[in-house]
Amino acid sequence: MNIDDYILNDIEPLTLTTPISEAKNLFENQPITHFPVVVEGKLLGSFAEDDIHTSADNVAYLGTIQHLLNVFFTENNSNVLELLKLFADNDTNIIPVLDEQKNYLGYFQLSDVLDVFSTSPFMVEDKETLIVEKLETDYSMSEVVQIVESTGGKLLGCYISERNGDRTQVTLKVISDDLNEIMQTFRRYNYDIISSHDNDVYLEDLKNRSEYLKRYLEM
């Protein structure tokens, strides 16, 4: 799926000669957090709705508050994960899109990008989700991939889902006929298994040993 198919142009960008009052009206009628400002086809930045509404001078033009422009954008060859990070970092629901010559093409909308991500094989494939954890200094993504593939599994995708102190958690989407073998291999490489799985032989064995010890102590 080509993310460029989701570039929108239904909202006309603002200019520095747009009255502030007009910009306020546009924000009230459009469900977006930022409005791009374009001059001669080039993006200058985007005004946030909150910044526009703090201006008491409705007669003035946007050029008088140009210092409030937020500069963020993407190019038309971005991927979904890069876009999601941009949306989060800038607390916005639209991202202006530029071509290689920095000409303004339109914008991506957060809801569209989320739809693309939610329909990706990583999200929709009904396969096992495995969360492993290891010391930040000891883990490597290449090792994670090697462990899955060396045990006959197939990795649909993975990402760093949490960093806690000196430890890192990695979430994996795995296709495997023997997930237990993958988990045991991770443990041999000193990874902790954070997610819970019904077919985890290791945990079942610990449970049985614990129950045996408990019965022994009660004798």
Image: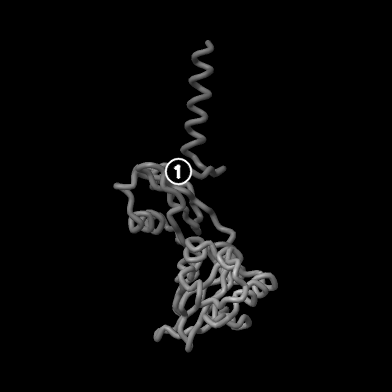
Under circle 1, the secondary element is: strand
- Residue at screen point 33% across, 47% down: 136
| Depth order, front residue of 54/37 | 54
- Residue at screen point 47% across, 89% down: 40
Compared across the picture, whether 121 is left or right of 167 comes to right
Residue 173 percent coordinates (x, y): 50, 57
| Depth order, front residue of 169/54 | 54
Residue 28 percent coordinates (x, y): 68, 70
Location of the N terminus by quadrant is bottom right
Q: Which residue is mark 1?
A: 193
Residue 137 percent coordinates (x, y): 29, 47
- Residue 5 is at least partly visible in this image: no
- Residue at screen point 53% across, 12% down: 218
Q: Pick out the residue farthest to the left.
A: 137
| Depth order, front residue of 204/9 | 9
| Depth order, front residue of 219/97 | 97
